[in-house]
Amino acid sequence: MGSFKDVVGHRDIINYIGNAVSMDQVSHAYILNGERGAGKKMLAHLFAMTLLCEKGGPDPCNECHSCKQAESGNHPDIIRVTHEKPNSISVDDIREQVNNTIMIKPYQGPYKIYIIDRADLMTVQAQNALLKTIEEPPQYAVIMLLTENAELLLPTITSRCVMLKLRYIRDTLIRRYLMENLKVPDYKADLCTAFAQGNMGHAIMLANSEHFNEIREEAVHLLKHIQEMELSEIVQAINHITVYKLEIEDYLDVIMVWFRDVLLYKATRDIDAVVFKEQINAIKARASKSSYEGIQLILTSFERAKARLKANVNFELVMELLFLAIKEN
């Protein structure tokens, strides 16, 4: 059963929701914005459960008929908007699932709640169709837009919504959760926390990943030998990485944390602050070879590579440019 008490972090959002419910000041439209794995779906689900809970408190009771329906995913007044195209929410999706049904009153609760995940994938036409509903919603309607990049929404939509931004969670809270709730050993919790960069969902995924250790070992092996490798060997390594294409962000994160360690050690000589402690000799060697400017260029190359991959630039080309930047600096 779900409760806001079980949520790690996001206290500002949880307090806001509790106050809005208690003071009967619930808005008709919200944007929950945060990166993938930040907890948007969970918060939206708990918010919806709270609004429909028969006991009417600032937290779902998990005992009433409404809470049990919501927890099972079968509440008639919680509508999760779906879309057939993986990277687009069309105007027909919004018209059929929202506009054409929103005037039908709630079946049993005081609210009718629409949750639109990845709302930043809505086409301009879809957003304009939704705008008409947000401008003049029925009193019982609550629309929750879950976004990774709220800037992709029209200003006319964002101006009519309450913006709830999911911020990064402190490393100490993530580490404690992994160790106490998932029984992850301390050394692995340290690694997962470092790679997650404040994202609890990402930390949990890494802790449960079958491939994470394999990806980590391959990336470290490449980093230790890349400066001695010929171009043909780098191309061969890139071809091998295509096996991890679906998990390429994890692969890149491993390398980024490695260079963060190199930069940190070069600046402080503090071994305790290094994540890859078992690779300290290789990190020391790299720190002595690379300049501060070179390491910064490498880290900038990572951001550029991630942006290019999101823009669907050729995978092999992006990785080749990245590895050449690593080799040359």
Image (cartoon, rainbow, N blue to C red):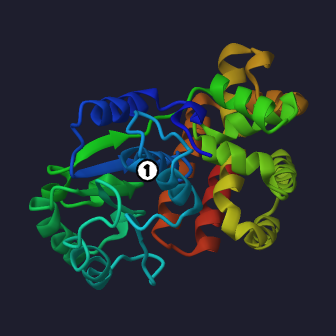
Asked which secondary structure carries label 1, the reply is helix
Q: Amino acid at mark 1?
A: Ala
Q: Residue at x 42, y 46 (%)?
A: 53
Residue 137 vs 102, above or below: the answer is: above
Residue 73 vs 314, above or below: the answer is: above
| Label 1 sits on residue | 44
Residue nearest the observer in this picture, 90 or 6: 6
Q: Residue at x 22, y 69 (%)?
A: 127
Side of 162 relative to 168 (left or right): left
Q: Residue at x 67, y 61 (%)?
A: 248
Count of numbered circles on the image = 1
Q: Percent position (x, y) of residue 119? A: 35, 64
Residue nearest the observer in this picture, 175 or 329: 175
Residue 29 vs 319, above or below: the answer is: above
Q: Percent position (x, y) of residue 270? A: 75, 14
Residue nearest the observer in this picture, 194 or 315: 194
